[in-house]
Every structure is written in structure tokens, then in C-alpha cells.
Amino acid sequence: MLRQPAKGGIATYPLNKRADRGPMSELRDKATGIVRRLRQAGHEAYFVGGCVRDEAMGLAPLDYDVATSAAPEQIQRLFERTAAVGAAFGVILVMDGDATFEVATFRSDGVYHDGRRPESVRYGSAREDVERRDFTINGMLYDPIDNRRLDWVGGMADIAARQVRAIGDPERRFREDRLRMLRAVRFAARFAYALEEKTYDALCRLAPGLVAISAERIGEELVRILTGPNAGRAVRLMRDTGLLKVILPEVNALAGVDQPPQFHPEGDVFEHTCLMLDALKDPSPELALAALLHDIGKPPTFAVADRIRFDEHDSVGAFMARAVCRRLKYSNERTDRVVDLTQHHMRFGMAPKMKESTLRRFMALPGFAEHLELHRLDCLASHGKLDNYEYVRQKLASLPPEQVSPPPLLNGHDLIAMGYKPGPKFRPMLDSVMDMQLEGKLTSREEAAAYVAREFPLEGAKPKD
């Protein structure tokens, strides 16, 4: 039950009962110790942001942040281990054992000109600090000493209403930091909340302005969205608000692209992709991005013959996925992994007909477990048949790792020692040896060398029987 607002308009709410003590309780105790130390030194201090929101929702926070009236230099004097990573904005890291806490001075922001950060800040009051923040559910303070929650912005009411609402004027909040538009989508998806009407309208109006944000920041926020709960819901919301066509026109183009109903009763390519994303469970960023991008080659390869077809959409999609990942400034390692998952996602359909060597080479792809999971999600988001998935999974389980990807019997140095000159012919020679090895037809270096001498005779040598 809501108590009557205290002086200054502070709405105070009783806390939920805390769960059994565990690692997160220890983290909370350390954060409480930071607040207590600041209070003993004569400063105001509270928990702030996501930890207050999560506890209000009955969730276990992943971390705890503290807001205080103490200036950065005062914070540093009070605690033994600190790091001034954001001192210009009043942010100090305080370390306690292996835990790190962000302790920020109450502040009020100056003018934003770059759609990212204020040109200046000044230290202010607790209320001013709250009112500069993004959304009401993130704008509450909590006093762990006196056990009260301070809510000037209606965060608890919006939790009850299950909605994400900007603090103050939503257009101003989004113009200050345009990345907040993607954060609004992330929170709405994560908690299965709606976007409050004025917040939604402002987001739609300002969506084109997202182009002013650096690709790195967009790429990082996109990963947070895709690896969080209800990623498909988030992508639908990005489409509805116009954000998707700004940052990922290749994915936006999936909407309205029909698929053969005998294989895809779920609907168009966009719906199929969103269903896959919603089925993700704690994915790696690479698997989540591959689920998003695996079918982006379908619009440019769409054709109708005996039925709707997307010939070579996997190869086309892999090329497009590389361009998307590069545009978002992902690392080469992440980009290669997403491209690889996209390139090979259709191969499972031929798995029962593959030669033993071909199947084993397929199963030896780096990170094959994610290839397998991407295929499972692909099936569940379409026809629902898992025959090929089960065939490959059982085949993989029946073989020890050394048989799936055995050390090669021969390498390039061996071929040189046999008298062959290095060159482009080495690859097909070694691939042929590996195929025979995977088929179980070659089991030793001697057999492999004899096979090479017979199948790839040196110039001037007579073929042996």
C-alpha cells in the first residue's frame, strides 16, 4: 500500500520481503556499507537506478549503484580503493573485495548538443539528479539504512501499470541522448511492458535521428537487446516505431516477404525471425545476431517457380551479414562467427544424405553446438519438424571428439618431404586425404602417404597399382 507522500513530495513504499541470503545479498550488504560510510561522513546517499527498479519488481539486481551528495574527491577520501573513471561527470568506482560499485555525485546536466552527453554538468540535489534520468522505472532512489524508497517521478505507478515512461518531456529525453530510444525498446521487451503513449509517439517522431549515434553504441545496445528476454518482441517494436529501418534496413525488409506455407506456416520472413528470437535462451551475442540475420538473403533472392523459392539465400545472406557486422563495428572474430552461422544454416537439410566424411567435416565446424541450436530454432519457428536436428545430434553424440575432428594424418610439410612443390594443389590433396581418413579408409601416416603417391603422382613418376 502507498503511504502518504512525505515532505518534499517523496512517495515512500514498503519493501517486498527479501529472498534467502546468497551471493547477491552479500553484494547488497557491501553496497549498503558504502551508503552507511557516506552517511556517517555527513552526506546523503541512496541506491539508485536499476537495482531499485529490480528490487521493486521482486527481481535480484545484477549490480548496485549509489548516488550521493558527496563530491568525487570526497568519495575518494572516504574509501581505500577507488578509480576515477568518470570524475568529469561525478562518477567514481569504489572497490570492495572483488566487487565494484559505481558511486555518482548528484548532478544536473547542461545542454546536450551531440545527442549523446551533456556539454557540462553541475552538482545538484537528489531530486535534480533523478529528474535528469531516462525513464521513471529507473528514476527511483532507495535508502537501505532507513528502509524506504523515494519516488518523485511515479516509477512505482508505472511498474504497476506495466509501462515504460520517459521522465518529464520524452522528446527532450530522447534528444539529449538518442540511444535512449533503443533503451526504451530494451526495457519494454525485457519486462514485457508497453511504451507509454507520449513516450511512444516521441520515439516514432525522433527515430530518424538515430543515424546521428555512432555505430559502435548502436551495435552494443543491439547486442543487449538481442541477448535479453523477448528479443523478438523488441525487434517488432523497433519495426513499429521506425527504428529498425534506420539501423537495420536489411531486417526491416523481411516484413511482407512471403514464404512457402508448407514449410513456413507461421507467416512471412519477419515473423519467422521474431519467433526465433523470442525462443532464444541465454544466447551468445553471435548466436543472437545469427538468428536475427540468418534469412536476410531472402528478399533479394525471392522468386516464384513451382513454389516460392529463395535459391542460395544462405550465401547471399552471409555476404550481407558481413556487411551489417562491419557497419556496426563488431570485431572480426564476432563477424566471422555470425557469417559462418548464416552461411551454413541450410546444410542440415542434406545431413542424412551426406557422405560420412562430409557429415563429419560439417560437425567439425568451430562452435558446432551453436550451428545445431540455430537449426533447432529455425525448425521450431517454422514447420516444427526436428528430424534432421535429431539425426545430427545423435550422430554427434555417438562419436568421440577425436573421430569428429581427428588430427590430420598428413600436412603440407609432409607433402614437401615427399617431393611435392608447395602450391594451390596442396589443399585438394590434403582435403582428399582427410576425406578418406574420415571415411575410415586411411588410418596411418604410411597409408596416407601411399594414397597420395598413388592418386597424385609426382611429375615424371609412373602411377603405381
Image (cartoon, rainbow, N blue to C red):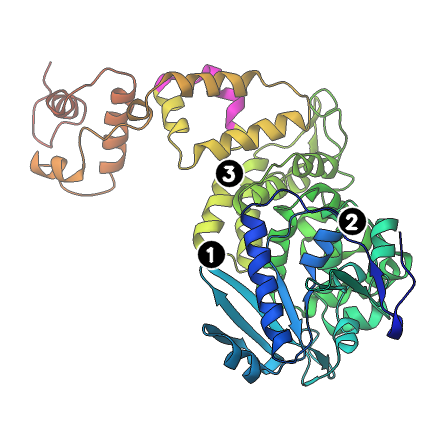
Of residues 362 and 35, the one drawn nearer to the viewer in this rendering: 35
Task: Tell me the residue that label 2 is attached to.
Answer: 237
Say what secondary structure mark 3 lies in.
helix
Between discs 1 and 3, the one toward the N terminus: 1
Q: Is residue 31 left or right of residue 185?
A: left
Q: Amino acid at mark 1?
A: Ser
- Could you tell me which residue is drawn at 67 percent across and 43 percent down? 229
Of residues 65 and 233, the one drawn nearer to the viewer in this rendering: 65
Q: Amino acid at mark 2?
A: Leu
Task: Tell me the residue that label 3 is attached to.
Answer: 341
Task: Tell me the residue that label 1 is attached to.
Answer: 331
- Could you tell me which residue is drawn at 64 percent across and 38 percent down? 301
Q: Is residue 351 left or right of residue 381?
A: left
Between discs 1 and 2, the one toward the N terminus: 2
Say what secondary structure mark 1 lies in.
loop
- Could you tell me which residue is drawn at 50 percent across and 75 percent down? 79
**Proximity of marks 3 and 2: CB atoms separated by less than 8 Å:** no
Q: Residues within 10 Å of mark 2 (few under 14, many from 20)?
A: many
Q: Residues within 10 Å of mark 1 (few under 14, many from 20)?
A: few
The vertical placement of 39 against 238, above or below, is: below
Q: Residues within 10 Å of mark 3 (few under 14, many from 20)?
A: many
Task: Give the x, y percent position of residue 28.
Answer: 60, 56
Indicate yes or no whether the magenta region holds residue 372: no
Q: Is residue 235 left or right of residue 335?
A: right
Indicate yes or no whether the magenta region holds residue 349: yes
Magenta residues, start to end: 347-356
Between discs 3 and 2, the one toward the N terminus: 2
Q: Quadrant of residue 31?
A: bottom right
Task: Give the x, y percent position of residue 439.
Answer: 29, 17
